[in-house]
Image: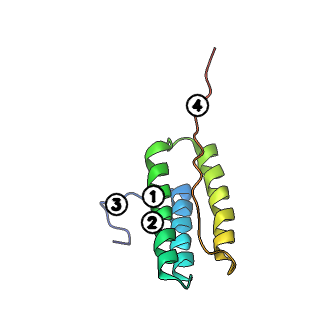
Amino acid sequence: MRGGSSGQKQLSGMQKQVLSLYRQFLRAARSKPQKEERMQIKCLVSTEFRRNALEVDRKNFLYIEYLLRRGKKQLDLLKSPDTVGLSSLSVHHSPPQTR
């Protein structure tokens, strides 16, 4: 549902960037010739975005910006005709410990 429905919250700029990146990944996946490849990319992208949505603190803007930059680099690689798939690398973030 789109538009200015009174029951919906407006998305922040960063939320719009994340949603845009997700959609760009799905479009890039559709451009791949092999069906298996497309499905594998869509599954991995969906899994990564959902995992980060659950694990990353919404107020940790620096880390979210880092993930956006990393995602854009991965998207650029995926758009290359020579790229046939993606793999996942888990980077675990832990808050700094105080003494």
Question: In x, y percent, where is residue 24?
Answer: 56, 72
For image coordinates 68% across by 70% down, the residue present is 77
Instruction: Classify mark 4: helix, strand or loop.
Output: loop
Instruction: Classify mark 1: helix, strand or loop.
Output: helix
Residue 8, label in figure: 3
**Along the line of sight, which residue is nearer the eye, 70 or 17?**
70
At label 3, the amino acid type is Gln
Label 1: which residue?
47
Mark 2 → mark 4, Cα distance in angstroms:
29 Å
**Along the line of sight, which residue is nearer the eye, 46 or 82?**
82
Disc 3 versus disc 1: nearer the observer:
1
Label 2: which residue?
43
Mark 3 → mark 4, Cα distance in angstroms:
32 Å
Question: In x, y percent, where is residue 61?
Answer: 59, 45
At label 1, the amino acid type is Thr
Dot 3, crowdedness within 10 Å: few (<14), some or many (≥20)?
few
Numbered marks: total: 4
Disc 2 versus disc 4: nearer the observer:
2
Question: In x, y percent, where is residue 9?
Answer: 38, 57
At label 2, the amino acid type is Cys
State yes or no: discs 3 and 2 in contact (Cβ < 8 Å).
no
Instruction: Classify mark 3: helix, strand or loop.
Output: loop
Identify the residue at the far top of this view: 99
Dot 2, crowdedness within 10 Å: few (<14), some or many (≥20)?
few
State yes or no: discs 3 and 4 in contact (Cβ < 8 Å).
no
Q: Mark 4 or mark 3, which is nearer the start of the sequence? A: 3
For image coordinates 51% across by 69% down, the residue present is 41
For image coordinates 43% across by 46% down, the residue present is 54
